[in-house]
Amino acid sequence: MTGTDIRYNAVFIVLALILSLIIVPLIRKLAWKYQWFDKPDQRKIHKFPTPRIGGIGIYFSFLITAVSYFYSNFIFQNSLIIFLSGSLLIFFLGIIDDFRGMTAPRKFIVQIAAGSIALWAGFNLTKIDLPYFGIIDIGFAGIPLTLLWIAGVTNAINMIDGMNGLAGGVSSIAAFFLGLIALHNGHIETAFLSWILMAAIAGFLPYNLRDGKIFMGDSGSLFIGYALSVLSISATQSGHAGISLLIPIIILGLPIGDTMMAVIRRLVRGRQVFSADLGHIHHRLLSKLLCPKKTVLLLYLVSIILGLFAMSISNSNKNFSNILIVVVLLAASAWIVYYTFMEFRDRFQGRFAVWNRKRSPWYKNKIVFSVSQSISKATSIERIYRLLAIAGRELEVDMISLNVLLNTENEKPEVIRFNWNIKGVDTNDGTLWLTQYPLSLDEYFSGSFVYGKAAWKRNRRSEEDEIWVMELGKSVYDWLVSSVKDGKVDTSPQQLQPINNNQKSPQLV
């Protein structure tokens, strides 16, 4: 392709950006009109209902521009056209999940079906080039490997979509580097499709990154993940097969690594792989930096560094690239072993180190799970108070406060107020590190769930404390939603007996 052709086709990248900048605010207005909102809860950072279907703008900006690009360049490759068909299926999956919700197994089945469409189109991993071993033909084993890659990347982008601008920014950076890799390998069409995807996401970011005026939703994150997984296979089909397999893994290293850690963490802790938690890398960084903007920018920087490293491998000679591959594999393996060991160590301490059981994360995980289950079965607000007091003592938190204003038919709203603290702790002396989580549901109730911990107690595992208490907050929120709507909340004043910090915990469930 000549320089003139590249400048001509660059128009389509600009077109995708302009279309996205136009369509996304229109979708936002439509969402406000019909109240298609993502409502806040204890796992989510946003505090107000926010339109959740920004992915529609991203998808149609990409689709319109891609079709225009194919038509103007007389590109009628069946593989690319079938790829668009697969993207349509995964987009509709996201739409259904945004509006009605869908179980994880059903979503996985649809993702495998979309992956099968990509396989039919010829996007298949058939060979692996291992350093110092040469090219290995994996034959039919490439079919499940390809399906696993497509479903894995699709879910990885979906999982990392937890902060304003995070999934969009990381994905656009990945699409940019995939385009460079595709151009280097002679796949011009794949390069421009990657950059068109990048531009469509970039047009969405101004409405999401700063103020979170609209979210991409599953319709956006699932489509972007699917597109990146398929384009990464196409972009790296030439050159050494092993390097081809490693390059997209490095470029998408942030979401892939976060997903791998989530799977390990949930398996070790005895939870379902598809269950949600607050242990993702952006949650942990946010607990340290305490600033969403800094957290997102730091993860952008990590994505750029990974992309540059992948480019260095792609442009290196065979011997040097083999050395880099071995270094990457050893580093990744060491990290996986270390992370798994740390999770198992925590559980080992919890099961067998009786003298230290109350300090082990495994024990506290068990307490949080038991208290959360008990909260869901509570029949009175007094029971909620006592359960929170138990949790506060066992998690070694210094203060827990629950304040909720119930909107009733009476002129005077009813108030739920509970304050618990360790004996001798002054909650007003300014030495407590406080975290507040909003509790609100439309016109039903509003308030907050607050916990405090002495500054000197904040150790290297303080982010785990946040995760545990946020999960408790979600349990309280869910109980309030079910109880208030059904009119079952008993707000009559109850006098609680002080809980002795040395007494044995009562039966929780």
Image (spheres, rainbow, N blue to C red):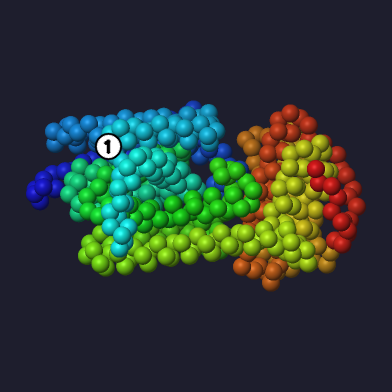
Q: Which corner quadrant of the image does residue 397 belong to?
A: bottom right
Number of other residues with Cα within 10 Å of mark 1, as a class: few under 14, some 14 to 19, many 20 or more: some
Residue corresponding to mark 1: 122
User: Which corner quadrant holds the C terminus?
Assistant: top right
Q: Which corner quadrant of the image does residue 103 belong to?
A: top right
380 displayed left or right of 143: right
Q: Secondary structure at mark 1?
A: loop
Rendered location of residue 350, percent (x, y): 72, 59
Rendered location of residue 107, percent (x, y): 48, 34
Residue plotted at (68% across, 39% down): 478
Give the number of callouts. 1
Note whether residue 75 is visible. yes
**Three-letter amino acid code at disc 1?**
Gly
- Say which of 450 and 260 sits in front: 260
Residue plotted at (14% across, 36% down): 73
* Residue 423 vertical position relative to residue 108 in the rendered view, above or below: below
Residue plotted at (8% across, 49% down): 2
Rendered location of residue 390, percent (x, y): 80, 53
Q: Which corner quadrant of the image does residue 428 belong to?
A: bottom right
* Residue 17 vertical position relative to residue 336 in the rendered view, above or below: above
281 displayed left or right of 195: right
Rendered location of residue 340, percent (x, y): 56, 59
Note whether residue 211 is visible. no
